[in-house]
Amino acid sequence: MFLNRERAIPTTEAPSVSREDIAPFTSRNNFASETTKQLPFRILDETFKSFPKFNTTGRSLLIKFNSLGEEQDPTTYLKECITALTDYLVDKVPDRDLVGLRIRNTENVQDKVVGISLRRRDQLKADVVWSVLGKVIESNARFALTDRLEVHLDHVRMPAGNGRVKTKGRSLDVLSELKRVL
């Protein structure tokens, strides 16, 4: 029961608050909007696939780079795009894990697939991706970056730790009583 401020008569209606009043103030929405503003590409589709038996996950993105500004140099813009894409893909991957990257043009099937073999995450930098992509662009092979691109990241989780627990919570005295060899 709420009091109406105008008449001071008790009412059973709750004060109405719209989603538009709440949404701009939440930190989650602000963070998501800032992230999309910072990326120089649009994510059209994103899929995940997991292979638990092999500690492997696959992540596929269908992206399209934003158009180039009038005052921007194409080479520096492309380097910024590759840097942002690489950082976005391997952001939550630990440094000891292995990652591999494939970039494929979906609109022109004749374009070759650009691939980077599995390597540790800390060794996959934007410079490595740029050097491989630069070699493909400089060669006679075609590769158009203005079309929709499928970017596939393979992530292999490396085992960590010291193995399984052999004592299973038993003290050394109890374990020595159980396992008498001689």
Image (cartoon, helix red, strand yellow):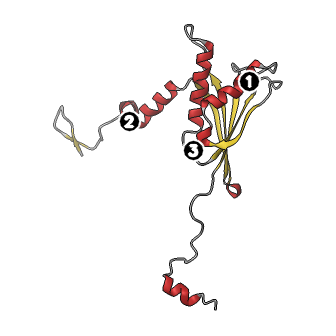
Check residue 26 in the rendering and tell me which mark sits there, or answer none: 2
Q: Residue 7, position in %: x, y?
A: 17, 34
Residue 147 versus residue 86: which sits nearer the camera? 86
Q: Are marks 1 and 2 in contact (CB under 8 Å)?
A: no
Image quadrant where residue 75 sits: top right
Q: Earlier in the sequence, mark 1 or mark 3?
A: 3
Read off the residue under disc 1.
135
Q: Secondary structure at mark 2?
A: loop
> Looking at the image, is mark 3 or mark 2 earlier in the sequence?
2
Q: Is residue 137 above or below residue 166?
A: above
**Residue 175 on image: x %, y %:** 54, 84
Residue identifier under label 3 = 93
Q: Residue furthest left?
A: 8
Observer able to see residue 148: no
Q: Position of residue 125 (x, y in %)?
A: 60, 34
Distance in Å between CA atoms under marks 1 and 3? 27 Å
- Give the residue type at disc 2: Thr
Badge 2 crowding class, 10 Å Cα cut-off, few under 14, some 14 to 19, many 20 or more, is few
Question: Is 158 positioned to the left or the right of 139 in the image?
Answer: left
Q: Which amino acid, mark 3? A: Val
Q: Secondary structure at mark 1?
A: helix
Give the residue displayed 60% in from the left and 90% down from the top.
Answer: 180
Can residue 29 be seen in the rendering of this structure? Answer: yes
Front-lying residue, 73 or 145? 73
